[in-house]
């Protein structure tokens, strides 16, 4: 099964890392090869991120990885989303000059010139607001357009907003929140075989993404405090309790916990008298 993947940039790096963590490391035939084997069942096709929706929609690849913004801009009904991969998070934002009195897209006047490389999404957004605009198509460097008199506003991808601020612009609204998505071709995945293969891929990738948000915690805890331990370590279906050899009054508690709750969890366990606390990362987690 062919998977169209970004050929450069952070999306490419993150996608390759995710596949490697899922046991599907890319094996290139040469340094600049545009094809790579991803395990025994998948082949990566490396192209520009903005071309991936077309590659998948036209059937050149059954699956693809690219930003939601590019998928939505393509408008191709043949595409559907299988999984939010979580990386490459950004937003398609509306921005104007800092000295503009406008503070929301709804206050932009009729006929406003909007520079963007996302004309379809931009038109759709302002149509939903009931505002008729003039789209100024550009391929890059949208931030300079308002200062050159080319446009009155821009719609562009924003991550932290620092590029807008450096260029004397302010963000006044969001058109779309985006991140990298695994997409598929409806017709290509309709057959049972390809659908099962794509489902196995989703399961493998999900197991890695799920594990990133969790940690495996082990601790020796007093046997007579197990009721309180269960409240602290609910885990997936409760903590696993193991007798310690010659432990007597002590048992070992094992559980999967939320990564962002590790500090609080350890503090509460220490208050119960827990010892030998160990926290480790998880490579993959299946529910």
Image (cartoon, helix red, strand yellow):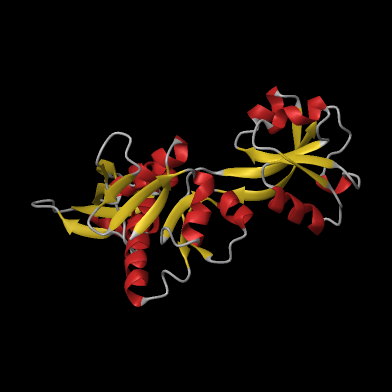
Q: Quadrant of residue 204?
A: bottom left
The quarter in which the N terminus is drawn is bottom left
Residue at the left extreme? 246
Q: Is residue 273 left or right of residue 7?
A: left
Quick check: can you spot residue 180?
Answer: no
Image coordinates of residue 140 in percent, x first then y, are 64, 34
Nearest the viewer among 114 and 58 is 58
Quick check: can you spot residue 1?
Answer: yes
Image coordinates of residue 276 in percent, x first then y, are 23, 41
Q: Is residue 27 left or right of residue 259?
A: left
Q: Is residue 281 left or right of residue 117?
A: left
Which residue is at a point 89% across and 34% down the rendered structure image?
Answer: 101
In this rendering, the count of numbered labels is 0
Image coordinates of residue 100 in percent, x first then y, are 86, 31
The quarter in which the C terminus is drawn is bottom left
Asked if residue 69 is positioned above or below residue 163 in the image, the reply reads below
Which residue is at a point 34% across and 50% down the rendered structure image?
Answer: 44
Which residue is at a point 18% across and 53% down the rendered structure image?
Answer: 249
Nearest the viewer among 21 and 186 is 186
Nearest the viewer among 150 and 169 is 150
Nearest the viewer among 230 and 195 is 195
Q: Quadrant of residue 8?
A: top left
């Amino acid at each position: 099964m062919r998977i169209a993947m970004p050929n450069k940039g952070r999306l490419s790096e993150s996608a390759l890392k995710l596949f490697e963590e899922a046991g599907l490391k890319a094996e290139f035939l040469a340094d600049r090869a545009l094809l790579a084997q991803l395990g025994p069942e998948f082949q990566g096709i490396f192209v520009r991120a903005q071309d991936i929706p077309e590659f998948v929609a036209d059937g050149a690849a059954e699956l693809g990885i690219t930003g939601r913004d590019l998928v939505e801009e393509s408008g191709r009904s043949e595409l559907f989303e299988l999984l939010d991969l979580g990386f490459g998070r950004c937003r398609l934002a509306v921005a104007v000059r800092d000295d503009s009195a406008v503070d929301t897209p709804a206050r932009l006047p009729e006929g406003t010139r909007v520079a963007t490389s996302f004309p379809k999404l931009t038109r759709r957004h302002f149509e939903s607001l009931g505002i008729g605009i003039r789209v100024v198509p550009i391929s890059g460097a949208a931030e300079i357009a308002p200062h050159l008199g080319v446009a009155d506003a821009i719609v562009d991808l924003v991550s932290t907003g620092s590029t807008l601020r450096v260029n004397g612009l302010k963000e006044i609204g969001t058109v779309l929140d985006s991140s990298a998505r695994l997409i598929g071709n409806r017709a290509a995945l309709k057959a049972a075989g390809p659908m099962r293969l794509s489902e196995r891929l989703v399961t493998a990738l999900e197991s890695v993404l799920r594990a990133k948000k969790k940690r495996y915690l082990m601790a020796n805890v007093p046997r007579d405090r197990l009721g309180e331990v269960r409240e602290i370590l609910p885990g997936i279906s409760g903590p696993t309790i193991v007798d310690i050899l010659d432990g007597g009054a002590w048992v070992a508690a094992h559980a999967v916990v939320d990564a962002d709750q590790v500090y609080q969890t350890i503090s509460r366990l220490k208050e119960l008298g827990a010892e030998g606390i160990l926290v480790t990362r998880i490579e993959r987690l299946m529910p």
